[in-house]
Image (cartoon, helix red, strand yellow):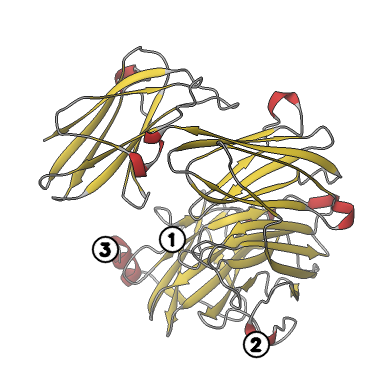
Amino acid sequence: MNFLLLIALTSLTVNQLPVGGPGTYSIKDEPLYFSFEAQRSGYLSVVVKASDDNTDLTLTGRGPNTYFLDMSPAVVDIDAGGNTGTEQAVFTIQSPGTYYLIVNPYSALTEEKNFEVLAWFYETGELIETSGMITVAERNINDMENLSGNLNLSEPIQIFIPQNYDASSNLIYVRAEASEDIMLELYSPENPLSYILQSDYDLEGNLGIEELLYYSGKEKPLIVVRPYQITDTTEIFFNVYFETVPEDDKLTLSSNKAVDESFIDPDNNALSYVYSVSIPEDGLSEVNLSSDDADLVLMAFSDDTMYYSDNDFDGNTGHEKLILPGGKYYIVVTNNPNSRQYSDFTIEVLHHQDRDASRTNATTLKLGVRSNGDLSYGNFDFQDYFVFTADQKATYTFEVQGLTGEGDLIMAVEASDGESLLYSDIDNNGDPTNEICTIELDRGQKVYVKIYPYSDYDGVFTDCGYFLIVTME
């Protein structure tokens, strides 16, 4: 635990967090501390609601051994529900122990203000409610399962976890329909404090309809339904639909190209069209979508990321483009959330070979030896990868310098699994083509260095030749 926090907690009054029912407290200048004694792992949902809408509060969470929010200093200030006096979050309880929550005024208050704290604990294996308004057979969300629920002031959040399906390599669809305006969110079970995706689109002109698409390549996300705003007299009824979405068709590259024509028809329950495609590792592929009928969105899902295009290229609401590195993808064509209508479309995948565009074919870096590279929009050379293996434990510096003085380079240092370790877009020495990263490496440790350009809204960048060098301190 943070040492200063420990001193504060031993010298100030710590309230026991009210779980299962509201507790009323007053606040002015000093923070209020709450403790939660966890007997087992699980998830803790906390709502702080001020009686005066003009009271802006923050909510902070600390664990027994570590910060367990994903931001420092672990402060939640989302003004949930459009109300500056309301904050809410889902905290992960990693193990038994004492956890602390701190309510603090965002700015100094001129007088004492009252607020309520409401909290609920969900055990790891029992996240789906089996009593009251929510009933799920065998505590599982099956394909096309319909969950009925109720949100109100005493319980303004519901958490579900899909369990009875194969989580690997599935595109999943979640839709919520409610009597009032709601938010639909997907959270990672590993870190359920930052949502993976959030829907607050108000689909079809209805404030109570939200939907999300997600590729569950590695984990089964938590599904969270919460109100946009709730008052003492508001009660929200909702349904949640969950299903896995199979591919409608497969795009197979032949001579580095694949083309298909199809349609979407929301009036007949054909809300999207889904393709699967494998992009070779020896370059990048551009996915071009065109339609003259409607405003379309183009998405691609893989194990580790999601690509999204709603840029309306060429001034046409049905024209979209994505640039995809090597890998397996689900490609989804659907309407813009605010425009549901029938559309014929054509989709085209064009593969451009560029061997050093992926970690698989990265160029080897040698200590103190310059390696030259070139990024060219016309030649479809959008990124270059280099690989370096440390001969000894030391601090290494990677520096890229442009040869032309034009363009704007960006440099990233990645681990073998693609995890980002360092990132530089600092325009070193006032030169947009110069970037630098310094990192300590163990003997034999391998890292990848990616060089790519800054591009404008349409994805266009200025061509730039450069050299990259690694030195050791």
Point out the frontmost of discs 3 and 2: 2
Task: Classify mark 2: residues with Cα within 10 Å, few (<14), some (14-19) or many (20+).
Answer: few
Q: Amino acid at mark 2?
A: Glu
Callout 3 secondary element: helix
Residue beneath disc 1: 69
Q: Residue at image x 40%, y 18%?
A: 464
**In the visual, does 96 lie left or right of 396?**
right
Callout 1 secondary element: loop
Between the C-alphas of marks 3 and 1, the distance is 17 Å
Residue 404 percent coordinates (x, y): 35, 12
Residue beneath disc 3: 3
Point out the frontmost of discs 3 and 1: 1
* Any part of residue 85 in sight: no
Between the C-alphas of marks 1 and 2, the distance is 31 Å
Q: Residue at image x 45%, y 59%?
A: 30
Point out the frontmost of discs 1 and 2: 2
**In the visual, does 51 lie left or right of 72?**
right
Identify the image quadrant of the C terminus. top left
Mark 1 touching mark 2, by CB under 8 A? no
| Extreme-right residue of the structure | 267
Identify the image quadrant of the N terminus. bottom left
Residue beneath disc 2: 138
- Front residue of this view, candidates 173 and 112: 173
Residue 193 percent coordinates (x, y): 50, 62
- Whichever of callouts 1 and 2 sits on the residue coming sooner in the sequence is 1
